[in-house]
Image (tube, grey):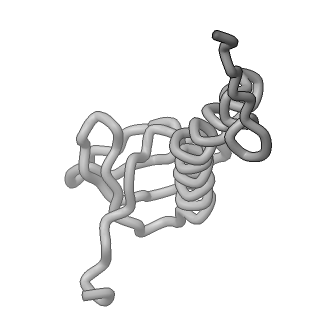
């Protein structure tokens, strides 16, 4: 008996190609992991660029304070009466919502 070989043509043959599957996996990887991370980084950079004196912020280490001054890449943060610290601008994790926004 002669064996009949089935050879797929059209879309089914494309999915069986290892190169095509690798491109599909890379596309999924890009959409699921890389794009959201880039969006988050851009949002964080915009937040850091928009800092101004008087903003209430939280640092990456969990310190709450109010921005007293900005000097290039550093920020003077008032954390208590008569207590000010100088931190890197990139160490700010978030800006607290003001009472006016509520």
State whether residue 37 appears in this view: yes
Residue 13 image point, x, y percent: 73, 35
Horizontal relation, residue 23 to residue 41: left or right: right
> In the rendered view, would you say 9 is above or below 18?
below
Q: Nearer the viewer, residue 24 or 32?
A: 24
Q: Quadrant of residue 9?
A: top right
Give the quadrant of the C terminus.
bottom left
Between 36 and 15, the one nearer to me in the picture: 15
Q: How many marks?
A: 0
**Residue 4 % position (x, y):** 68, 21
Q: Is residue 8 left or right of residue 102?
A: right
Q: Residue at x 25, y 51 (%)?
A: 64
Can residue 70 be seen at all in this image of the molecule?
Answer: no
Give the quarter of the image for residue 6: top right
Q: Compared with residue 21, is residue 92 higher up or lower down, i.e. above or below?
A: below
Left or right of residue 100, residue 87 in this image = right
Point out residue 51 in the picture as x, y percentages from the top left corner: 53, 62
Looking at this view, name the residue that lies furthest to the front: 1
Q: Nearer the viewer, residue 9 or 21?
A: 9
Name the quadrant of the N terminus.
top right
Q: Residue at x 53, y 60 (%)?
A: 47
Residue occupying image coordinates x 25% and y 43%? 63
- The residue that appears at 46% across and 47% down in the rendered structure is 76
Of residues 19 and 53, the one nearer the viewer is: 19
Where is residue 2? Give x, y as percent. 69, 12
């Amino acid at each position: 008996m002669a064996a009949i070989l089935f050879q797929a043509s059209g879309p089914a043959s494309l999915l069986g190609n290892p190169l095509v599957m690798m491109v599909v996996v890379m596309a999924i990887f890009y959409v699921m992991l890389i794009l959201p991370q880039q969006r988050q980084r851009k949002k964080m950079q915009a937040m850091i660029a928009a800092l101004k004196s008087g903003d209430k912020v939280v640092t990456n280490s969990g310190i709450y304070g109010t921005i007293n001054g900005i000097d290039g890449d550093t920020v003077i943060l008032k954390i208590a009466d008569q207590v000010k610290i100088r931190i890197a601008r990139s160490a700010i994790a978030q800006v607290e919502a003001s009472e006016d926004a509520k």
